[in-house]
Structures are given as C-alpha cells and as structure tokens.
Image (cartoon, rainbow, N blue to C red):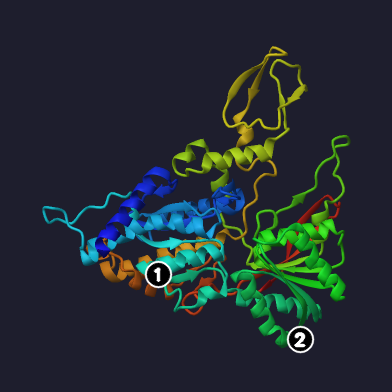
Amino acid sequence: MFLVRLAAWLGLLASSLSVSRKYLNYTGDIMLGALFPIHHKGSGRADCGKIQLEDGVQPLEAMLYTLEQINKDPNLLPGIKLGMIAFDSCDSPVYGLEQALDFVKGFIAHFNEFHEREFQCQDGSTPKFRGGGFDHVVAVIGAQSSSVTIQVATMLRLFRVPQISYMATSPSLSDPDRFPYFFRTVPSDVNQAHAMLEILRQFNWTYVSVVHSNNEYGNHGFEILSSLASKYNVCFTAAQRVDKEDFRDTDYDSVLHNIINKTDVRVVVVFADKSMTQKLMDAAGRLGIVGRFVWILCDAWSATSNHRGVDIILKESKAGNSPTDVQNDDSVLEGALAVQPLSRNLAGFDTYFKSLGHNHSAVNPWFEESLTEYCKKQHSGSRYRLPSMPDGVTTELPEDEIITSTDMSTDSAAGTTITKTPELCEWGRGRGYRQQRYLHFVRDAVYAVAQALHNLHAELCGTGITGVCKAMEHIDGDVLRTYLANVTFNDEGGRPFIFINGRDGPPRYSILNFQRDSNGHRYHWKVVGNYT
C-alpha cells in the first residue's frame, strides 16, 4: 500500500512540475537545488507578488556566477561541472514548501536506483528517471527567510539531503535533533542578540523598550535578548508584540502609544520581520514621532532591498527640479542603528550582472520579467530625443513605456517617428543598480558544498582522477553531511571559513547607522563598525 501511495505521489509531483512550475535548470554532472524569493509573498489568493530585483534576482544570479567561477577552476572538482535547479519560494513558507516538493521525486528516484530498488520495469530492469537532473541533486541552497527555511529543512531531513541557507538566522535551526542536515553561512540570532546588547552597553543605554514580532523569529529573538540582558546591565520595559496577520494600522499606532504613555524610554529595540518593522515605522510617521526614539534594528530590517547600504533618494519637485523635504518614514529612522551579517561586496559580480543581456532569459526564466521591472523603475518619465526634431529637443514618454528592444513607432498626432534605444535599458545604467551586500553568503554556501564534494571526490576517486568516478555516482546524504561539517575554505575576504559547531556560520556582523548626507538630499545606511 505504501508503494502504491508513493508511486501515486511521485506521479502527481511529476505532472505538477510539467504543467505549472517555472524553474531554472543550469545543467551539470552534479546538481544543487536552490530556493530564492524571486517574488514577494502574494496577497489575498495570489501566491506571489511583485518580483524582487535585489532580494530575489540578485541572490539567484550570485549563485549562477559562483557556479561559473567554480566550474572554471581547474583545481576544484576537476572535470566535474556543478549545476543547479532553482525554484521561487515567493517568500512564503507554504508556497516555498510546495516548490521544494518538486525535488522529492528526484530524491525518491535517487534512492530507488541506488538503494531499495523497489520499482522495476516489466523486463526486470531498473526504471530510468527522466526528470531533467532532479535525481542528481545532492544538496539544497536556501531558503532566505527562517520561516521558509524551517519548513524546507523539516522535509529535507526525511530524505537525508543537506541544506545550506545563506540568510536564515533563527536559533531553532541550530538544533541538530530537529534539523540534522541543516547548515548556514550566516550566524545564529543568538550572536545578533549579543551584538545588539553590546551596542546598548557601549552607549550606556540601560533602560530600553522592545517591539518584537509574534512569530518564531521575533519571539525567539526577544527570549534571547531577555535572557542575556542582565549580563549587559540592560533592563527591558513595556515590551510590545506585533502580529502580521491580525494587526491593522491602528494596532501599530497603539503599540507606540503604549511605549510613550507607559515609559520615558529613548531607545527602542525592534526584533521583527521586515514587513512588520515597516508598518511600525509607518505608524511613527503618522504619529509624527520624529527624534523621539533611537531605533535599534535587527537584520531582518537592515537586510531589506531599500535599506541595506542603498541610498534613499528624495523625490524631485516638478517646478525647480530640486529635492523636496525629507519623507516622514525616513526622518523617523534618522540616527537608527542596525545589526546585519557582515556587509561585503562579492568581487566580480557587478561586472557579471551588468553584462547580462536579453539572451540570458534562456538561462534564467525570470530574467525578462526582472529586466522589465528594472526598466520601469529606471526610465519612467525619462526624456528621449525624437530623431526628426532639431538638436536639443526631446519628448517625454508615458510613464508606463518600457524600453526592452529597438522599436520604431509613429506619433500619429505629430507624424513623427520615435526611436527607442535599447541601450538605455541595460543593467547598471544610472542609479538603478546596487549590489546587495550579503551575496558573499550565497557564495560561501555554494563553495561549502563544492569543497565538500571535492574532498569527497579525492577520497572516493583518488588523486589525479577527473570527472565523476564510479564510486561517486551515488552521493550519500549522510556522508556529504559529514564532509560539510568539517569543510574549510577561504571566504570572500580571504579568511578561513568553518562551520561553528559543525552547522552555523561564524559570528560576523556589521553595525550600520542611518544617516542623511551633507547636502540633506539622501539618506543611506553607513557601516560604522563590525562585531565578531
């Protein structure tokens, strides 16, 4: 009965993939699975929202870029090409798990071929899996958020598949009994709590309020902060809890009213997911709370695409083409401090990313959508020359015009031909692109697997042997887990990387301060210190 159900489930998975799943397949001899939040979480009945250029597309491309670097290195996995199969989690635990289930049929085929051989053809031979490399997946990179990662890790342990996240920081994931096959290249939030408390101690902020989200991330974070507070001579008062599902704008207003009315604190620690932190900042703007608090923010906020080392450019006025006054939510944040995993550029990625053209859609199925969104943000309302007009004369295209290829069209009213130039819509033009500063954690995750596989290859195949030898055709998850736990390699900064306690990334943090520039026209996060 179990085999019948298993076979039926396998068939459903195969049909669901062929009919409705969009995924990236970068072929290789050994495959890595991956989950990235290519889109925001959807609202209502929609599974997915708008595409995420910075927090979704960039990490995906960082993994592709890293694989290219590894595959070009003759000293790492010689003769073996690493590939990847990537799905979109849409930053949703439920949807992300559904996408990860598509790996399951490959895992089952893998187990059947090399272990139980429970399925046989009528002639007695072993069935061949025709699933586009899914049966060659040996580890999964991702997910990004802790909530999605926990769901996926719970499933992957059933198939003994190692998983390496590049951003999930929940302390729960350090539990080897619950998540025996989980690794991460970022540190646990236990270390983040120490970093936040150290900031409070350095500034002698001893009487502090805290707002935390009512989920595993926020509740665990608050528990850790509370348990460690006395060691740093910090007292938390009037703790407030916010809820993503049940809270309305008025509830966020009430949270701030409670802190103001019940305390005289000047410092508020926020340990909440980015969407709830944004709503809290919106409430502060509505209530005119500017300069009242110094905000100490966790990595979930400082990691957002609009705030991780990215300038916030103030809107230009129509008349004088000069910056307007600072917006409320930005004013509220001025002077805030944030803790984030170490901020560092991924060398060579900018050149790679800016070189991507329209033909890259053959590799990345979300590329055209992301390029369109980039163009929409970068060139809305831009002015373009009409070839038939005298020099110096331009016309403004409608806001929804998107330039993705050379296009000749006629203005019926003026009888003028307009040439739309594709170069204006390339990556990296103007202020539309800034590398996310955590991509090196994606790089570390991929290199960890590559180095572990390299060490395994040397053990199973011997020195001087290139390619996948017979002994390495089946890679056991328990064996790979052991090699991962003991792996060492140089990180992007040239320092030796090892997993702490055989599973967590080393404690590496940057301390950021939200500042206005000298002319008052921009806000930006500036790295003001490190914590290790």
Closer to the camera in the image, 275 or 463 = 275
- Residue situated in front as seen by the camera: 455 or 511: 511
Residue 335, position in %: x, y?
81, 64
* Residue for point 46% across, 52% down: 87
On residue 233, the disc is 2
Q: Secondary structure at mark 2?
A: loop
Q: CA distance from mark 2 to mark 1?
A: 40 Å
Q: Residue at x 60, y 30 (%)?
A: 422
Look at label 1 and name its amino acid.
Answer: Arg
Among the 4 quarters of the image, the one containing residue 99: bottom left
Mark toward the start of the polypeptide (2 vs 1): 1
Is residue 165 among what the camera can see? no
Q: Amino acid at mark 2?
A: Asn
- Which callout, 2 or 1, points to the residue nearer the camera? 1
Between 155 and 469, the residue placed more toward the observer is 155
Q: Are marks 2 and 1 in contact (CB under 8 Å)?
A: no
Residue wearing tag 1: 157
Relative to 185, residue 25 above or below: above
Please state which of residues 90 and 445 is positioned toward the viewer in this rendering: 90
